[in-house]
Image (cartoon, rainbow, N blue to C red):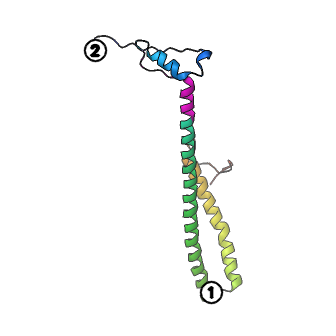
C-alpha cells in the first residue's frame, strides 16, 4: 500500500484495427500496468441494448397500468349501473312514469358532469407546483379568472 495507484486512460484511434478487437485487446493487456481495456463501440452497443430493454419494461408497465385502470373503471361502472337500476326501479314503484324517470335522470346528468369537472380541475391544479389561489379570485381549468 506504500505506492500510489496511478490511473491512466488512453484513447486510441487506429482504423486498421477496427475489425480485430480481440487481438488489439490482447496486445494492450500484454503491456505492463494495463488492467482493463474497453472499446467505445462495444460500450455504446451495450448501452443501446440496455436502453432497449428498459424501453420494453416501460412499455409493459404502461400497458399494465392502462389495463388496470380500465378494469377498475369497468368495475366501478358496473357497480354504479346496478345501483342506478335499483334506484330507478324504486322510482317506478313510487309511481313515477317512464317519462318522469327519464326527466329525473337527464336533470341529474349535467349536475354530475359539473361536479366531476370541478373536482378534476381542482385536482389538476392542486397537483401542479405553480398553482396558487387567493380569496379574491380563482382561476378555472380554462384559465379564466372568476370571483366566487
Report the side of 35 relative to 97 (left or right).
Answer: left
**Residue 16 lies in quadrant:** top right
Please name whichever residue, 60 or 12, is drawn nearer the observer in this view of the structure: 12
- Residue labelled with disc 1: 92
Assign a secondary structure to mark 1: helix
**Screen quadrant of the N terminus:** top left
Query: What segment carries the magenta color?
Result: 34-48
Residue 39 highlighted magenta (yes or no): yes
Please name whichever residue, 75 or 4, is drawn nearer the observer in this view of the structure: 4
Q: Which mark is residue 1?
A: 2
**Screen quadrant of the C terminus:** bottom right
Please name whichever residue, 31 or 72, is drawn nearer the observer in this view of the structure: 31
Q: Residue at x 59, y 50 (%)?
A: 124
Q: Residue at x 55, y 23 (%)?
A: 40
Label 2 environment density (alpha carbons within 10 Å; few <14, some 14–19, many ≥20): few
N-terminal label among 2 and 1: 2
Residue 140 highlighted magenta (yes or no): no
Q: Which mark is residue 28?
A: none
Amino acid at each position: 500500500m506504500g505506492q500510489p495507484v496511478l490511473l491512466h486512460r488512453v484513447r486510441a484511434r487506429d482504423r486498421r484495427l477496427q475489425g480485430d478487437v480481440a487481438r488489439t485487446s490482447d496486445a494492450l493487456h500484454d503491456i505492463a500496468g494495463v488492467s482493463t481495456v474497453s472499446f467505445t463501440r462495444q460500450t455504446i452497443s451495450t448501452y443501446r441494448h440496455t436502453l432497449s430493454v428498459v424501453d420494453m419494461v416501460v412499455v409493459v408497465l404502461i400497458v399494465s397500468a392502462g389495463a388496470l385502470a380500465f378494469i377498475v373503471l369497468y368495475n366501478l361502472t358496473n357497480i354504479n349501473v346496478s345501483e342506478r337500476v335499483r334506484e330507478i326501479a324504486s322510482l317506478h314503484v313510487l309511481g313515477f312514469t317512464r317519462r318522469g324517470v327519464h326527466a329525473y335522470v337527464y336533470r341529474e346528468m349535467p349536475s354530475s358532469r359539473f361536479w366531476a369537472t370541478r373536482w378534476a380541475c381542482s385536482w389538476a391544479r392542486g397537483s401542479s407546483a405553480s398553482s396558487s389561489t387567493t380569496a379574491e379570485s380563482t382561476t378555472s381549468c380554462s384559465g379564466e379568472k372568476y370571483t366566487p
